[in-house]
Amino acid sequence: MSTSASNTPDIIELRNIACDVASQAGKYVLEESKNQVLHETKSSASDLVTEIDKHTEALIVDLVRSQRPDDSFLGEEGTSQKGSSDVLWVIDPIDGTTNFVHEHPGFGVSIAAKLDDVIVAGAVADPKHGELFDAAIGNGARCNGELIRIERSPKLETALVATGFSYEASERKTQAKILTYLLPAIADIRRMGSAAIDLCSVAMGRVDAFYETGLNEWDIAAGSLIASEAGAKVLTIKSFVGETLHVAVNTCIESEFLNLLHSAMEKSSRDI
Ligand code: 2AM
Ligand code: CA
């Protein structure tokens, strides 16, 4: 483990660990997605998903800890371990669980490193598409090792926008209402099923914006850094129809898109 004289971790080293571990965990998750039991009865599938999720999270923690024994860990499947260093690893072992269960493309592994509460490095593996995204703060974002930078210059009406829906029926109703105000103003909506991969799609210019409410830190930690290092504006709005809203948007349409979201929120809250 290399550290500087001040004991500050090397951010590139953190990114490389995130990449290496996300890649290994991604291969495991891809193999498990082919498990026939997943595609049989729904109840046995949910037990098996939990088991695979937990196993993947444990694998990620073990692999990172073998290189960074003093760090802290936070994971979707319940990992919460306090270490003595200033680095916290934020882990989503399988983001896009519904896709994973259906063996549908669009699930992945997300691993981010936070230093003193700032996300400084991260990686997202999308194993079904053979893509590994990463970023280190101030050092850019990459896909399969190649630097990526958003190049599209969309207008609001030509923008392709990704979003996602909650698992809660009442929240889905509100989210659907907001969509009715967004859809007429943009090119189209995509609902792929993984917030982590959606943020990488913003970074690649495959979509021009992503927004979603009701997400957890592990869903967006790595992807947010990847999108911002590729040139997107990434922001969190604390109170959006009572929920925290996460947005990543091509800077060409930043203000128009945020205005549209706010007006959709206001109109939909009057309707409900
Ligand atoms: P998951 O696949 O790990 O559950 C889909 O819209 C995106 O939102 C996915 O990243 C999904 O994460 C996340 N998501 C949606 N509703 C969620 C909820 N209630 N709790 C946690 N994550 C949620
Ligand atoms: Ca998730």
Image: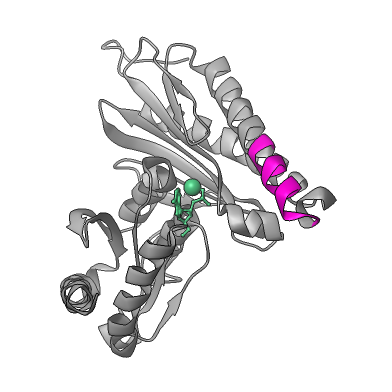
- The relative height of residue 116 versus residue 147 in the rendered view (above or below) is above
Which residue shows up at 39% across the image and 15% down it?
82
Please provide percent x and percent y for residue 233.
25, 59
Which residue shows up at 36% across the image and 9% down it?
84
Q: Is residue 152 visible?
A: yes
Please provide percent x and percent y for residue 188.
41, 83
Which residue shows up at 43% across the image and 58% down it?
168
Horizontal side of 123 relative to 215 (left or right) equals: right
Quarter-of-image position of residue 99 = bottom right
Quarter-of-image position of residue 115 = top left
Q: Is residue 155 visible?
A: no
Q: Main secondary structure of the magenta part?
A: helix
Which residue shows up at 42% across the image and 78% down it?
189
| Magenta region includes residue 248 | no
Quarter placement of the C terminus = bottom left
Please provide percent x and percent y for residue 155.
27, 84
Horizontal side of 259 relative to 162 (left or right) equals: left
User: 211 or 178, which is in the foreground?
Assistant: 178
- The relative height of residue 86 versus residue 143 in the rendered view (above or below) is above
Q: Give the total number of marks visible in the rendering.
A: 0
Range of magenta residues: 40-51
